[in-house]
Image (cartoon, helix red, strand yellow):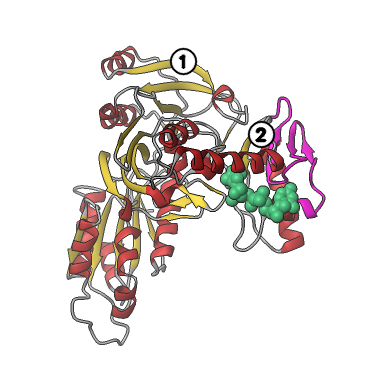
Amino acid sequence: MVNEITVVDDYGHHPVEIRATLEAARGCKFNRLLVLFQPHRYSRTQHLWDEFCRAFNQADILVLLDIYAASEAPIPGVTSEALATAIRKAGHKNVHYFRSMQEGIEYLLKQACPGTPSLRLARATSAAPAVNSWFCWERRIRRRMRISDPIIVATLAEMNVELQHGAALADLTSLGIGGTTDLLRIRKHESLPGLLKLLDANDVQHKFLGGGSNLLVGDGELPWVVLQLVRPEPDVVLDGSFARVDAAADLGRMITFCAKHDLGGMEGLIGVPGTVGGALRMNAGAYGMQIGSYVREVKLYRAASRTLETLRGDQISFEYRHTSFAPDDMMLSVILELPSKPFKLILEGIRICNEKRRSSQPLGQKSAGCIFKNPPGASAGRMIDELGLKGLSVGDARVSDRHANFFVNAGHASATDMLRLIADVRERVQKNYGVELENEVVVWNA
Ligand code: EPU
């Protein structure tokens, strides 16, 4: 750590590694992520060009240096300068190319800490033949707080943001678990940049809440406020085969509305609770389909640029229960392109999916859907079931008797109970199958 800057030197070269590192760094709540990257080998840069264009979405500032040849001959057109242009075209707002490593480092240091030359660091790094370094601003320790300052309260009202003091998140999540904090309900997307600026300036940490259906929130007084979009009326507007949908729209109601206008494709998602924004963020899927396949455009508040941005579908990576959005990006609206299908046929698809769901999932109970992602080629639910863990409990947190990857709140479970149950099951699966299960549920722990 130098002054207020944490410098992380990472050797990841592949776009997937880069994305994972940046995602982890974003999760650490650094104020900004400043990235210096030197692509490794011409051939790799050429083969993974498109992936590189999306790998840095979560960096606030990206500096690219010349490609490190590693004994390869240059390939015409494959240069860092051209890559910088391509990344800009793919939507990144702050990309710079420097021929000299020294200049690149000094540029980033100036951005990170204006007026503080740190030549010692620059020299040390420039001595290395190749570099993949992440420069991050240090996280500020923020104090727990509720919004009581009358100036902030008045500014929120001017922004048309509704403030609810001491909201119980247990009431806003499908698990029925979670402590209390202030809830800010946003009526106009346009107020977000100003709102976030206000919160930042007053050291108020925040989280974005969608439908709360895939979420486990910590207990007690929470150290951040929660932002939530108010659903507008109408929340779905159709134009031919395109549906423009507000992120706050209910997923199931949106699917039914489109079905009534002979637009289908998303029947499998009908029983998935939550908002369209939540489904989009984690690329919700079921019965062989996923929402990402239909996305043509997304409007979002982009944490990296602190602005509202519009991304084309091909600028976003949609993978199994994962997207290239940053954890602190907020989905605002989406344009979906849906195949036309007669209402009757869609209804039949919906009926079949509903039946399958009803027969295998504990729909009437408080849950967050599947707790773990399925590991490649395997089923988390089947593994947990095979270990005889259905019914295993910690307090009122319980592995469902109906589907072993659903953990239910059978009464007054606390987040601590649920987290202990998750850790216990994960450990048993690891011990017996050698597989480390990854959470599907999002955990907001204090
Ligand atoms: N199985 C068991 N015991 C159990 C649960 C499942 O033996 O307790 C077996 C089933 O018999 C089946 C296999 O495991 O042979 C897979 O089960 P299932 O068809 O229920 O699918 P899943 O992989 O457990 C996935 C999604 C669900 C989605 C269904 C239907 C994940 C983590 N889960 O479940 O999504 O509804 O397929 O497409 O990808 C969610 O995302 O929260 C969710 C519930």
Q: Decide: few, some or many residues near mark 2? Use Cα within 10 Å; few <14, some 14-19, many ≥20.
A: some
Which disc is residue 14 wearing? none
Q: Residue 214: horizontal and vertical position, in percent?
A: 55, 38
SS assignment for the magenta stretch, majority? loop
In terms of secondary structure, where does tag 1 sit? strand
Where residue 244 appears, as percent x and y from the top left, is 32, 36
Q: Which of 356 and 83 lies nearest the eye of the viewer?
A: 356
Relative to the observer, which residue lies in front, 120 or 305? 305
In this rendering, would 357 be left or right of 298? Answer: right
**Residue located beneath label 1 in the image:** 165
Q: Residue at x 26, y 43 (%)?
A: 310
Query: Which label lies toward us, 2 or 1?
Result: 2
On screen, residue 41 above or below 161:
below
Residue plotted at (47% across, 33% down): 256
Point out the residue furthest to the right here. Answer: 388
Query: What numbered label is drawn on residue 363?
Result: 2
